[in-house]
Image (cartoon, rainbow, N blue to C red):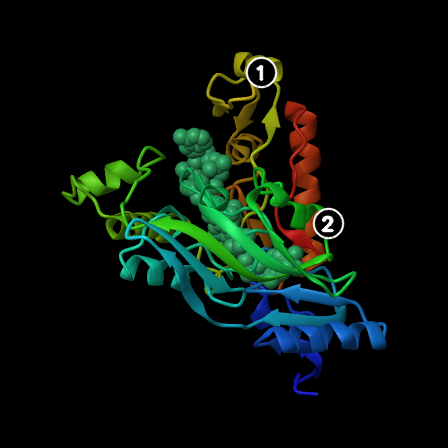
């Protein structure tokens, strides 16, 4: 067996909340053969298998009685390049932001708005990661996953992935698909998306009128570093709740009673409400009980001030959900994967 199994391994370094729990077994997969070995082991020994990447979208509520397999496969390759359209493939264990920087260094654009998102390439399709008006579905060219039920490889096209807002077929069928590598259709001709939030303003402040994709990446990285807590300093999993999509009727009703409510009309007639606004309006911003809290400046981000347990964080999240439901008749959905 080439897979190195560790018994009773601490997962604290492998979840961005910094929650202290143990995995009964832990291993890293550096290639497809490690992945197959882990899968075989889990079938033979009847141990559940939990695949993780950077652990930046996880809430671990107790010791994990499973073989936790951390994807650590590396490799980036250009599959097609006609001078304009470039298809790039990256292994699941590649660090997302390092991959984004690699593409930009090659003069390839398309991922710049997704700069500085923590985690791995393999986890990115799980919730169709998105930021500043771009989601990976916009640049997706395909992926290869292992079907854990049959052991067969399957290539997914865009249509197969059922990407939605922070959603995909991989999220809807938990534990079925193990993503091995992902392909992106990028470009040597930058088509920049600057219309979202403070991006254009930040570039203007820097005196950049004709930005390159790398300029956009740097601007977004600087905005993110100012706004979001660094998990290495303060444990968190980014936005803890999705922005809820509600009917136009409910949005209009809420706007009557709360004129400052922030909502973005969607193409399908629904309205996306800013969950952070709802949580702040309900008074949770900066709330802290023991070491579980809501960030002082970002009400969408739950934080671990030191030794919060996953259950304490989950309890806080559920209390916020109940309060928002009662005050605004809006059901908030958690974004991280809870185990
Ligand atoms: P993990 O947390 O390790 O895993 C997440 C889920 O994917 C788990 O269910 C796991 O089982 C599964 N999984 C992981 N790898 C694989 C694989 N290879 N095959 C199959 N399943 C797999 N998200 C956004 O969308 N936009 C943002 O702007 C954003 N900003 C963030 C900022 C901060 C500070 C933090 C902490 C998080 C942020 N996130 C954001 C959330 C998170 O970074 C992303 O969801 C990221 O893609 C998670 O990657 P990961 O490797 O850490 O996944
Ligand atoms: P922000 O710019 O302060 O905006 C607050 C919310 O309003 C965002 O969640 C965003 O929704 C929405 N929004 C803002 N401008 C919009 C527009 N022009 N059209 C439609 N919706 C708009 O948000 P932020 O917290 O600083 O985050 C900036 C970006 O990074 C956002 O895209 C956010 O999703 C992403 N981010 C995600 C996470 C995560 O863990 N998932 C963590 C940090 C940041 P959307 O979220 O739908 O874009």
**Vertically, is 96 above or below 266?**
below
Which sits earlier in the primary sequence, circle 1 or circle 2?
2
Residue ID for mark 1: 248
Along the viewing direction, whichever of 227 and 288 lies nearer the viewer: 227
- Give the image location of residue 228, x and y in percent: 43, 50
Along the viewing direction, whichever of 149 and 225 lies nearer the viewer: 149
Instruction: Look at the image and tell me whether residue 9 can be seen.
Output: yes
Instruction: Look at the image and tell me whether residue 304 can be seen.
Output: no
- Give the image location of residue 331, x and y in percent: 68, 31
Quadrant assignment, res 13: bottom right
Label 1 to label 2, Cα distance in Å?
Answer: 30 Å
Q: Say which residue appears at 45% left-offset and 52% top-offset.
A: 184
Quadrant assignment, res 321: top right
**Vertically, is 325 above or below 66?**
above
Quadrant assignment, res 290: bottom right
Farthest front residue? Answer: 82
Q: Say which residue appears at 72% left-offset and 53% top-offset.
A: 174
Q: Say which residue appears at 71% left-offset and 65% top-offset.
A: 50
Indicate the quadrant containing the C terminus: top left, top right, bottom left or bottom right.
bottom right
Left or right, 19 with reference to 226: right
Left or right, 294 with reference to 10: left
Farthest left residue? Answer: 207
């Amino acid at each position: 067996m080439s897979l190195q199994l560790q018994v009773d391994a601490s997962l604290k370094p492998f979840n961005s909340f910094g929650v202290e729990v143990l995995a009964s077994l832990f291993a890293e997969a550096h290639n497809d053969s490690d992945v197959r070995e882990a899968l075989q082991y889990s079938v033979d020994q009847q141990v559940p298998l939990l695949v993780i990447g950077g652990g930046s979208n996880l809430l671990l509520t107790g010791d994990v009685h499973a073989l936790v397999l951390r994807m650590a496969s590396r490799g980036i390759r250009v599959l097609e390049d006609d001078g304009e359209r470039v298809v790039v493939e990256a292994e699941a264990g590649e660090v997302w932001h390092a991959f984004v920087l690699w593409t930009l260094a090659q003069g390839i654009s398309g991922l710049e708005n997704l700069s500085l998102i923590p985690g791995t390439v393999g986890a990115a399709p799980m919730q169709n990661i998105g930021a500043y008006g771009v989601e990976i579905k916009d640049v997706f060219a395909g992926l290869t996953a292992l079907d854990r039920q049959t052991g067969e490889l399957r290539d997914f096209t865009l249509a197969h992935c059922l990407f939605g807002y922070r959603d995909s077929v991989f999220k809807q069928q938990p534990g079925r698909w193990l993503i091995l590598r992902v392909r992106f259709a990028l470009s040597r001709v930058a088509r920049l998306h600057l219309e979202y939030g403070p991006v254009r303003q930040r570039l203007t402040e820097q005196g950049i009128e004709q930005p390159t994709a790398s300029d956009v990446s740097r601007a977004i990285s600087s905005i993110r570093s100012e706004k979001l807590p660094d998990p290495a300093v303060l444990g968190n999993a980014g936005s803890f709740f999705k922005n809820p999509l509600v009917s136009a009727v409910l949005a209009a009703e809420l706007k009557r009673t709360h004129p400052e409510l922030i909502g973005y009309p969607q193409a399908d007639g629904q309205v996306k409400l800013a969950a952070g606004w709802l949580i702040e309006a309900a008074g949770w911003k900066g709330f802290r009980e023991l070491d579980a809290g809501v960030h002082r400046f970002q009400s969408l981000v739950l934080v671990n001030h030191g030794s919060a347990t996953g259950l304490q964080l989950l309890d806080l999240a559920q209390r916020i959900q109940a309060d928002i439901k009662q005050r605004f008749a809006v059901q908030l959905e958690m974004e991280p994967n809870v185990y």
